[in-house]
Image (cartoon, rainbow, N blue to C red):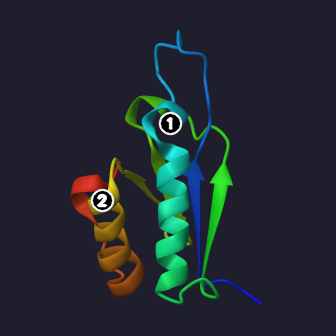
Amino acid sequence: MFFEKHIFCCINKRPDSNPKGCCSLKNSEKLHTELKLKIKDLKLNKKIRINKSGCLDRCELGPVMVIYPEGVWYSFKNSEDIDEILNSHLLKNKIVERLKI
């Protein structure tokens, strides 16, 4: 089975003292789980694979995700951002410019 898209979500945890911060301290695990559930609810889980990722080295922007095969990077902070990425990028192939990094 081949997936049409792969999404890598950073869930890395850096020390609190790191000047770049980290995605984990910005709710990345919770948002990753929410994204995964929404993909499943939309019955897209056979077409789209959601992966946990280590550091994607954009910690100051976190949480971050990258969607392949397009290679588009997003910074997302809440459910509304996830919904916008789902509805625009994943369902309509339209990049969400305001969240793109």
Instruction: Identify whether 60 is placed above or below 100.
Output: above
Tell me, for residue 23, which label it has, or none: 1
Q: Is label 2 in contact with label 1 (beta carbons under 8 Å)?
A: no
85 left or right of 37 in image? left
Name the residue located 53 percent from the left edge and 9 percent from the top edge.
17
Return the residue nearer the eye: 62 or 79. 79
Which quadrant holds residue 52?
bottom right
Does any portion of residue 68 appear in the rendered image? yes
Does any portion of residue 71 appear in the rendered image? no
72 left or right of 49 in image? left
Furthest toward the left, the residue is 98
What residue is pinned by disc 2?
81
Which quadrant holds residue 87?
bottom left
Q: Quadrant of the N terminus?
A: bottom right
Name the residue located 54 percent from the left edge and 36 percent from the top edge.
24
40 left or right of 46 in image? left
8 left or right of 101 in image? right
Instruction: Identify whether 38 is placed above or below 96.
Output: below
Q: Amino acid at mark 1?
A: Cys
Q: Position of residue 75 (x, y in %)?
A: 37, 48
Neighbour tally class for label 2: few under 14, some 14-19, many 20 plus, Cα within 10 Å: some
CA gap between label 2 and label 1 equals 15 Å
Name the residue located 43 percent from the left edge and 35 percent from the top edge.
26
